Image: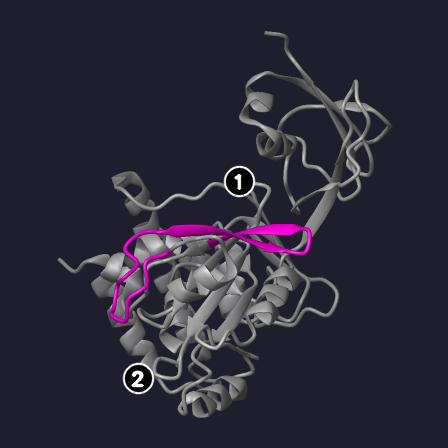
Amino acid sequence: MASIDDEIRELEAEIKKTQYNKATEHHIGRLKAKIARLEKVKEERSRKGGGTGFFIRKGIYPNIGLLGPPSVGKSSILNAITNAESRVGAYDFTTLSIVPGVMEHKDMKFRILDLPGVIEGAHEGKGRGREVIAVLRNVDLIVVVLDPFKYDPSYILRELNREGIRINQAPPKMSVILKDRGGLTISRGGKASFDEELFESICREFGIINADIIIRQPMSPETFIDGLLGNRVYIPALFILNKSDVPEFKKAYDYLTSLGLEPVGLSVVERRNIEVLKEKIAGKVRMIRVHLVPSNAPEDEEPMVIREGSTVEDVCRAVHTEFVERFKFATITGSSVRFPNQRVGLEHVVHDGDRLTVFLRKG
């Protein structure tokens, strides 16, 4: 009996051999929907199976993942921009686990994660690829590191895409309301344009026969499938071309530029563009400032700079773990609450400029 991977490969082969035109676009769209459905089944089975893997926790510092082929200099870059000491070697798979480091830039801090090199077939588990890519679903920025000898990012982009990671893209503007009865309605909003008949057949492939779907943008079948699945993550990405000190650099740089990727040329050996890289990373991640106001002491002069989307618990943990363990409540004045000094719990998401006072239990 064919495995799910075998079925997916057969469907992909059929897409490759089918010439795309107006007459075949519905057939190709349905094949892509079948692949997405099989990948969803595969993902659900993988979760049930458990197993070991990498895990990172969201905190007040943004998580930045260094991703790329083996031996392109990720560890050297980590050491150059952070306080980490990642083992460096001129051979494949030097990094066998995640090595973290903290990058400081101006008044901000970022957690940089040096990940094992990714090879083609990562989505099938080759080279611990599925574990590595699973980590990336929880980072705030992906930094794709290449060099003049391994500069084609195509397979990396394919691996990310297969695992539901969409880089430098916005989520589809659509809503899906499932119903018990009433049939399927797909309607347009704004400047939406799409093939309604094709989208209806894609819905049937996913077993969606009763739903109200509103689409608010011009949409391809692939984007529509992403919106139906609802398990895609949308993460900004930055491309680095390391080893700008070697003669082969220009050819690789021109190739990446022709793809519209705007790579940052870097040389760790010559310390070239290290500060530029820090600036680029900081510019890609949204940060906010929160003022800590002690209940019985003067307010801190310098605000805490944290990742956008952080909670009161994240702030407390950054001060001291005891603040979480003994937490009673907090009061906030700012745009995240309806009125000044409003009481909030650990799960409350803070906003830029909030003034936060934490009250602890005695003992």
Quadrant into which the N terminus falls: bottom left
In depth, the one of 228 and 47 nearer the eye is: 47
User: Which residue is most to the top?
Assistant: 363
Place residue 277 in its image quadrant: bottom right
The relative height of residue 260 versus residue 120 in the rendered view (above or below) is below
Q: What amino acid does circle 2 point to?
A: Lys
In magenta stretch: residue 20: no
Answer whether residue 200 is visible to the viewer in this image.
Answer: no
Residue 133: percent from the left, percent from the top? 38, 57
Q: Is residue 312 left or right of residue 253?
A: right
Check disc 1 and report the residue beneath it: 180
Q: Which residues are magenta?
A: 86-112
In depth, the one of 49 and 144 nearer the eye is: 144
Residue 43: percent from the left, percent from the top? 34, 50
Q: Residue at x 63, y 60 (%)?
A: 282
Residue 257: percent from the left, percent from the top? 54, 86
The relative height of residue 48 versus residue 63 in the rendered view (above or below) is above
The relative height of residue 331 versus residue 58 in the rendered view (above or below) is above
Q: What amino acid does circle 1 point to?
A: Asp
Check disc 2 and report the residue beneath it: 17
Q: Is residue 45 left or right of residue 252?
A: left
Q: Nearer the viewer, mark 1 or mark 2?
A: 2
- In the image, which disc is placed on residue 11? none
Answer whether residue 352 is visible to the viewer in this image.
Answer: yes
Give the mark nearer the N terminus: 1 vs 2.
2
